[in-house]
Amino acid sequence: MIILIKSSIEFFKNLPAKKCAECGKKIEEQHECYGNKCDHCLQS
Ligand SMILES: [Zn+2]
């Protein structure tokens, strides 16, 4: 069980940074619920 927990943590740490589908800017982790656009493009 300890190995499973550790590997799942590693999985999330190794996820590539999300990028905005509009401008290619890196999306902050806390905004992942917004989908695939950054704040700037969402507001436009
Ligand atoms: Zn953008």
Image (cartoon, rainbow, N blue to C red):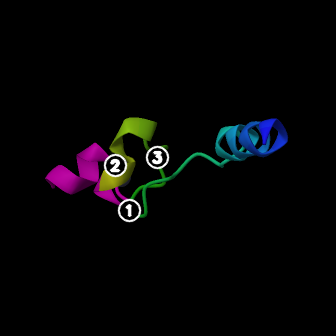
**Beta carbon of the mark 1 residue lies under 8 A of ligand 1:** yes
> What span is in magenta?
34-44
Secondary structure, mark 2, is loop
Secondary structure, mark 3, is loop
Residue placed farthest to the front in the image?
1
In the rendered structure, which amino acid carries the disc numbered 1?
Glu
Q: Residues within 10 Å of mark 1 (few under 14, many from 20)?
A: few
Q: Which mark is residue 38?
A: 2
**Beta carbon of the mark 2 residue lies under 8 A of ligand 1:** yes
> Which numbered mark, 2 or 1, is in the foreground of this view?
2
Picture coordinates of residue 21, whole percent (x, y): 43, 63
Does residue 31 appear left or right of residue 44 in this picture? right
Residue under pointer 1: 22
Q: Residue at x 15, y 51 (%)?
A: 43
Tally of numbered tags: 3
In contact (CB < 8 Å): disc 2 and disc 3: yes
In contact (CB < 8 Å): disc 2 and disc 1: yes
* C-alpha distance separating marks 2 and 3: 7 Å
Residue placed farthest to the right in the image?
3
In the rendered structure, which amino acid carries the disc numbered 3?
Lys
Q: Judge whether 12 appears above or below 24 on screen.
A: above
Residue in the foreground of this view, choosing between 35 and 21: 35
* C-alpha distance separating marks 3 and 1: 8 Å
Residue placed farthest to the left in the image?
43
Please identify the quadrant where the C terminus is shown.
Answer: bottom left
Disc nearer the start of the sequence (2/1): 1
Residue under pointer 3: 25
Q: Residues within 10 Å of mark 2 (few under 14, many from 20)?
A: many
